[in-house]
Image (spheres, coloured by chain):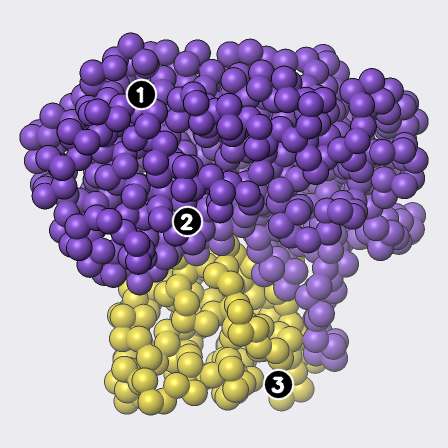
Amino acid sequence: MASEIEFLGEAPGSHYSGDALLLADEEADDSVSVSGGSSTPTSQLLAGGVGSAGPDTDAVASALQAGDLEADRDDDDDDDDGAANPSSSSQPAATGGTAAATAASPARRPRLASTSLKEALRAEASVSSRSGASAANANAAASSATAGLAPAASSPASNNSASSTASDKPAPQAAHQSDSVVESAEDIPFNWAADEKHIFILSNAGKPIYSRYGSEDRLVTMMGVIQALVSFVQDKNDTLRSIIAGDYRFVFLSKGPIILVAVARTGESEMHLSSQLHIVYNQIISVLTHTQLTSIFEQRRNYDLRRMLAGTEKFFDSLITLVDSDPSFFLTAVRCLPLAPTIRNTIGQTLQQNRPADLLFAMMIAEKQLVTLVRPKKYPLHPSDLLLIFNLVNASTSFSAAESWIPLCLPKFNNRGFLHAHVSYLDADLETDADAPARSGSGRVCLLLITTNKDLFFVLSEFRKQILQSLQATQSMEAIQDALDRENYRIAHVDIAGLRHFIYKSKNTSQFTQPELEAPYTTPEERQRLFRQYQHVHSAIHSTARPLKIYFNNGSKEAMLGWITTNFELYATFGPLVTKSGAIAAVNRLLQWIKHEEDKLFILNAQVF
Amino acid sequence: MSSLSLREVKLCLLGDAGVGKSSLVLRFVADSFNENSESTIGASFMSKTLIVEDQTFKYQIWDTAGQEKYRGLAPMYYRNAAAAIIVYEITRKQSFEALKHWVKELRQFGPSNIILAIAGNKSDLESQRQVSSDEAKEYADSIDALFVETSALTADNVSYLFEALSKRLPQESIAQPKPASTVQLVDETPNKPKNEKCGAC
């Protein structure tokens, strides 16, 4: 801790970086997101119809600010890792402030050489300056002085792969840096740079709480740096939001007593990374409640929150994995199990009949799809709360072995206290008597009965039995099983030439639908790439600086169309040869198809009591 | 109560995180073992019928989470219990110390007539033993608790633990302690003690 205070105190560079950051933040709503979001749509739209967007815009962007470059990376992550890196290590010097770079970095080198802490510091410091540089051109002197550090920080790391987070890189053979940097890299066997996205959580006091990969214990020094950066900006009554360094984007979220940081070279926008941090924060609240989280740190600022989160790491891991593969999270919408509306109504009735007085929410979830949800009329359930419940069910295998009774806080519903959830699988036989065979434990249909009354377990357990009987009597269980066995619909059912895949979100119901991913999106890499494309379109459309209504980009591998209206958001993927008018005609037909199927795909009438 | 009747026994497992409470229950209830057992969230509930000396016991088992943040919820599970099994692992001294705290808490806040059993789990890891049998036995005797070293992995002594526990249950303690063991009674007359801590909305 002492060292970074010293660092901040002494180093003129970091002071400047602080100023630059402040500027960045003041203008953040325009400039940061401008660089992240709107330049992209422009260049994308220009590129649209011409041909491949990714490489072109990269070329364009390389002449622009580093920040602009970042945004354009969305298009082809794969290529960027290899192709863009040589340039990214040199570009900062070229774009950020060449003269200053050479002037500043030699001066800095001796101080920063030896330990990983210092190296991390340098990475952070240089990083912060760059964000300043891209967002606040006006502050040329300040930013260039510090931007000069960027090459120094990134080059030791970037020769073989991406740049920045220099502290954790294995020593590159071709590093032209001082040897001490290389030595320090060897102190850390875990290769932090191997993963393209990290999420860190720390307390305001700088204590590590969570890291998605590796052990957070190893990050004590870096957590200190993060804490110093955040509090340094806070001291000026401002908020540090994001930093760009080479391929990496650092996004910060300071929430009460804790700080969350995302470090990603995925090309995701600041908006998305920040919303992911909010989701992770809500997961903490879900485990602890806001009240408890606050009071813990009021009593002991230095508290090691890992003690309280012990046993729940799997929920964080699962959540962070899901936000990188499941559109639910950036859409803030859930997917429903396709079911005939009559069957769904019957199931909903079952959950309502003879319900115990204190029952708040009752829902069935099957393989990350909502079967049905019943709730009191006056208490809506926010989709982001529902997604936390999805994650809870998804992350835990232990629920299928028994009836569980868990305290659960739904942050949007009420972040001050716990609800109690009776969780069980309906298709796992829980009645084990002496002669009963061992359970398979492979239930697929999860029932959640949520109440405010912590003494209601046995009542709910009894209610569960009643539900099960009633579901069996109406053959609803079979219907659900059938729907699960039948795989999700295919794009061939939609039968629109050239349309490869789509995501349709109904805004009124916060639900979405999508067909199975098919060729060419069969490998994990291709699926991930398509997912990033969708995120990119979503980001462009929702850019605060320049929101779009329709987005069309004809890339080398596929054409993407995004369309937002008051009622829906539609994201569609076509083959690369489609024309804009062809794509628009196709989505109009798609909308008709969805209209026709909507009572199966969506829960249109919420069942309330 | 006739000895042929079904006797419902509310049982609660307590102990430090990671000592193997859920694994013990899983071994007892389903005779299986899950190597990738996850930490329990909140608590889970299972039941199992066991016949000991012509007497049928229906165990209703609360398997609680050992983590610190769930500690405040524990009274909810032990307050109506006829018996409690407090688990430690023989390979971790600290878990044995934690057990003593649980005993103290039960003595102070638990039902006065609760039957205690102490299970030293992971007895298959003899080479890593940190808590000697003698020490644990001596402690168990001092608090008048049943003591068994078990292994959920090898099933060693697991059914013995429950059988021995069943024999310890006094006749009347099953008929009397809390009518709450019958579900309908809870439903109509919520005669359970008032709320403990734990922030409800």
Could you tell me if residue B174 is visible in this image? no
Q: At label 1, which amino acid type do we have? A: Ala
- Kindly indicate whether the residues beneath marks 3 and 2 are on one polypeptide chain: no
Could you tell me if residue B170 is visible in this image? yes
**Left or right: A66 with respect to B184?**
left
B145 or B31, which lies in front? B31
Residue at which label 3 appears: B52
Name the chain under label 1.
A
Indicate the position of residue A421 as horizontal and vertical percent values.
Answer: 59, 45
Q: At label 2, which amino acid type do we have? A: Ser
Disc 3 packing (10 Å; few <14; some 14–19; many ≥20): few
Residue at which label 2 appears: A161
Indicate the position of residue A373 as horizontal and vertical percent values.
Answer: 73, 35
Name the chain under label 3.
B
- In the image, residue B5 sits, relative to residue A417, either above or below, namely below
Instruction: Give the quadrant of the C terminus of chain A.
Output: top right
- In the image, residue A298 sits, relative to residue B96, either above or below, namely above
Indicate the position of residue A143 as horizontal and vertical percent values.
Answer: 24, 21
Q: Chain letter for purple?
A: A
Mark 1 vs mark 2, CA separation in Å: 24 Å
Quarter where residue B3 is shown: bottom right
Chain B drawn colour: yellow
Residue at which label 1 appears: A133
Mark 1 vs mark 3, CA separation in Å: 78 Å
Quarter where residue A242 is shown: top left
